[in-house]
Amino acid sequence: MAKPLKRYVCQACGSVASKWQGQCADCGEWNTLVEEAGVVVTPFAAKHNLQSGGRAFELVGLNADVKLPDRAATGIKELDRALGGGFVEGSATLIGGDPGIGKSTLLLQAAARLAERGVRVAYVSGEEAADQVRLRARRLGLGQAPVQLAAATSVRDILTTLGQGTPPALLVIDSIQTMHSDLIEGAPGTVSQVRASAQELIRFAKERGTALVLVGHVTKDGSIAGPRVLEHMVDTVLSFEGERSHQYRILRAIKNRFGGTDEIGVFAMQQEGLTEISNPSALFLTHRDETVTGSTVFPALEGTRPVLVEIQALTVRLASGATPRRAVVGWDSGRLAMILAVLEARCGLSFSTCEVYLNVAGGYRLSDPAADLAVAAALVSALSERPVAADAVAFGEVSLSGEIRPVAHGALRLKESAKLGFNRALVPASVSAEKGGLSISGFRTLRQFVDHMLSRD
């Protein structure tokens, strides 16, 4: 139980004594020590008072001059885009993705590009032997790159080795779940080991100005395995997404202290490794020579990059009494249920006797609320068997009241659509007709949009 701390203060000079005495030891006055009520303290607080004894530091204003961080561009434009321009000196980057998605391949290509330009690069593998990494490098045509390679799992050994001489400008650790610190008990991969190993590696990177890249495993739901604090410790978190059955890969920036978030880099897995995709819309758009019912093009926005994707819908009539099925690939199933409810309640369309299937072509995953209008267009087209024009795009957010609300960066979406050959846009009414050089059809409510599609007006 905490006990009050007694103190006696001299009324003449203000000196503080821990016990009463007749004469003040500092000023020599008699009968001037008076007991005062002290603060209630615990034994821990009595021994560990952090209000004194530290090193004072300087406080600076927001208007102080700040030097922009030095970046090392890898030469892989899609990777540099996701990073915000390249690896920052002294930064820590965490990249996660499913097994076999291409994390090690991408980092090996980036390390080789930097090493070929004279940058000192160290690649430490904890999952593969050094010979295995060399064989992959030869298969990718990077066997002659001057990358310093090692296979090790002890953090102490790694830091001791790299601490001798000039530290590397880029250090790749593949992966952090295989690292082991002898300061912490436990097997590699445990929460305490991952946190302790990452902390020591990040401290080394900050002190020596090394750009550190940590490869992380992911759980079944796609989040990075290990303690959540690991994502807070690093400066940048990249997620490598994609299906192994598809050739494309998306590198998405989830967190970036030196650049924008939600930026993406698009790659295709080829025999010679990961190749950049300069026009990612071509991956997610099928040949549109003929109009097809239930198909709509949506200009999605990933960070600052617009990507055109195709949304496909299919409705199948059921016999009375059967329970209709709702299947969604690449979009939120709850969002689909909301759009179906608004179409029934506000527009008079009945989907209760239909099975509904929705798919985002190419395996792409959408989270942009601006896709509501494109999804509604695909559903109405599939139900009425009236195709949407092949040269038209649609975007807009649908509210529960049936209102079509404006979305961010409409001009950028229209500009990209016009560049890829589209001529019409089905958008919210607030979008200006002069933007993007397309023929604009604006709608205030979803009922007006459905009437336009069904030629009711």
Image (tube, rainbow, N blue to C red):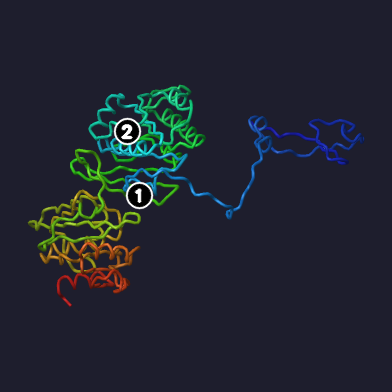
Give the x, y percent position of residue 353: 13, 59
- Seen from the viewer's position, the closer of residues 275 and 329 is 275
Picture disc at residue 81: 1
Give the x, y percent position of residue 295: 16, 60
Give the x, y percent position of residue 103: 30, 37
- Mark toward the viewer: 1 or 2: 2
Q: Secondary structure at mark 2?
A: loop
Measure the alpha-carbon separation of dots 1 and 2. Answer: 23 Å
- The residue that disc 2 covers is 145
Q: Residue at x 28, y 24 (%)?
A: 131
Q: Secondary structure at mark 1?
A: helix
In the picture, the quarter occupied by the N terminus is: top right
The kind of residue on which mark 2 rests is Ala
Count of picture labels? 2
The kind of residue on which mark 1 rests is Arg
Picture disc at residue 234: none
Categorize mark 1 by other alpha carbons within 10 Å: few (<14), some (14-19), many (20+).
Answer: many
- Seen from the viewer's position, the closer of residues 412 and 243 is 412
In the picture, measured across the screen, residue 62 lies left or right of residue 433, that is right
Residue 229 sits in quarter: top left
Q: Is residue 262 above or below residue 152?
A: below
- Looking at marks 1 and 2 on the same chain, the residue that comes earlier in the sequence is marked by 1
Q: Residue at x 22, y 64 (%)?
A: 393
Question: Mark 1 near mark 2, Cβ–Cβ under 8 Å?
Answer: no
| Residue extending furthest toward the bottom | 457
| Residue extending furthest toward the left | 319
In the picture, measured across the screen, residue 123 lies left or right of residue 335, that is right
